[in-house]
Image (cartoon, rainbow, N blue to C red):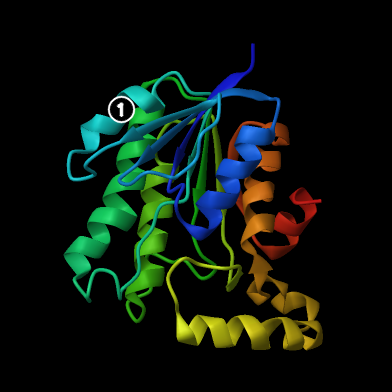
Amino acid sequence: MGQTVTLLGATGLIGSHLLDILLNDETYSQVNVVTRRPVGRSHPKLLEKIIDFTQLKEMDPYIVGSETVFCAIGTTNKKVEGDKQLYQKVDYDIPVHAAKVAADGGVYGFALVSSIGANPDNNNNYYLKLKGVVEEAVSKCLIPQLIVVRPSLLIGQRKERRIGESIAQFVMPAVSWVLPKSMNKYKSIKASEVALAMVKASQTLPKGIHFLEYDEMIKYSK
């Protein structure tokens, strides 16, 4: 019998790729998707649970018993209309709560989407500071295997339109080749590659805390 895994953020750019990969990987027999809106998919492995994320404990039964939790949940400043408290409720409260439940419930692995430049001491960029604080909090949870991916600009088709990001997606791949190797971590990367790296790394890396930036994500996405 295959493993049970849990996915948070299945409707996002990386999360949608994660869902495809997990459903098509014979390693897994059940994929728990905890979401606030339907993912619009039907599959024998898929167990979808729609919850109110203001009631975080609703997700707990779908985390406990999993081999690995994949957390790709996140919002944007535009979606929360600049409300930092609401931003924190999504980008901090949900992943940290999930990590604590995973640790208490005996989950082996936790794979988290963060960002290049994440730093809890960054007082000039709220987004990067928050990502760093989340990394710090999740790292303190006693989960045997923690994988944190830190992508730069993501390449992929989002459901919502972001004009600035669309321009950057066109420009960055064209100039990435001129970046010195020491700057590889800032290269744009396909969301599908990030998702595949998360899954493959969770299947192969040993216990411990692992941070994957561009080079490592490309390695595990092959």
Kind of element beneath mark 1: helix
Q: Is residue 172 left or right of residue 105?
A: right
Q: Amino acid at mark 1?
A: Asp
Front position in the image: 85 or 128 = 85
Quarter of the image for residue 84 reads bottom left
Q: Is residue 137 left or right of residue 180?
A: left
Q: Position of residue 121 (x, y in %)?
A: 37, 69
Q: Is residue 213 above or below residue 52?
A: below
Q: Position of residue 39 (x, y in %)?
A: 43, 45
Q: How many marks?
A: 1
Q: Is residue 42 left or right of residue 195?
A: left
Quadrant in which the N terminus appears = top right
Quarter of the image for residue 48 reads top left
Front position in the image: 206 or 23 = 23
The residue tagged 1 is: 60
The residue sitting at 61% across, 43% down in the picture is 20
Q: Position of residue 175 (x, y in %)?
A: 74, 88
Q: Is residue 38 above or below residue 207?
A: below
The residue sitting at 51% across, 81% down in the picture is 165
